[in-house]
Amino acid sequence: MSEAGYTAIVTGTSSGIGLDVAKAMLARGWRVVGIAQGKADLADPRFEQVEVDLLDEAATAAAAQEIAARHEATHLVHNAGL
């Protein structure tokens, strides 16, 4: 089943559950914006990586504005381990 048209912001995509969630969404046709301190090992044209430390409020706010300017997210999966 294709779910093309959905765009998710997923935190914690550099490894573990966040990375697995991003992969599952991509497999279903979603666009995914991954947020993490490190790079995710994903090579998919529908995946965009944003590297940011979510404990840094100014950097997080700047990243959120940047993402909002380029994407209309339909879903948020907040999975980052803080």
Image (spheres, grey):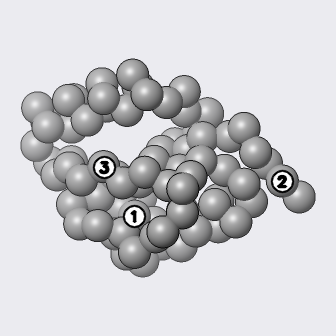
Secondary element type, mark 3: strand
Question: Measured from the top left, where is residue 12 in percent x and y?
Answer: 36, 61
Question: Measured from the top left, where is residue 13 in percent x and y?
Answer: 40, 64
Secondary element type, mark 1: loop
Between marks 1 and 3, how big is the CA–CA gap? 10 Å
Q: Residue at x 20, y 29 (%)?
A: 62
Q: Quadrant of the N terminus?
A: bottom right
Of the two numbered discs 1 and 3 on the same chain, state the one appearing first in sequence.
1
Disc 2 target residue? 2
Left or right relative to 27: residue 76: left
Residue 81 visible: no
Left or right relative to 31: residue 29: right
Please rate how many residues cluster around mark 3, counting C-alpha atoms within 10 Å: few if below 14, some from 14 to 19, many from 20. many
The amino acid sitting under disc 2 is Ser
Q: Nearer the viewer, residue 77 or 69?
A: 69
Of the two numbered discs 1 and 2 on the same chain, state the one appearing first in sequence.
2
Figure check: 77 above or below 67: below
Within the image, what quadrant is residue 23 found in? bottom right
The amino acid sitting under disc 3 is Val
The amino acid sitting under disc 1 is Thr
Q: Residue furthest front?
A: 45
User: In the image, which disc is placed on residue 64?
Assistant: none
Disc 1 target residue? 13
Please rate how many residues cluster around mark 2, counting C-alpha atoms within 10 Å: few if below 14, some from 14 to 19, many from 20. few
Please rate how many residues cluster around mark 1, counting C-alpha atoms within 10 Å: few if below 14, some from 14 to 19, many from 20. many
Q: Residue furthest right?
A: 1
Disc 3 target residue? 50
Are the residues at dot 3 and dot 2 in contact (C-beta closer than 8 Å)?
A: no
Are the residues at dot 1 and dot 2 in contact (C-beta closer than 8 Å)?
A: no
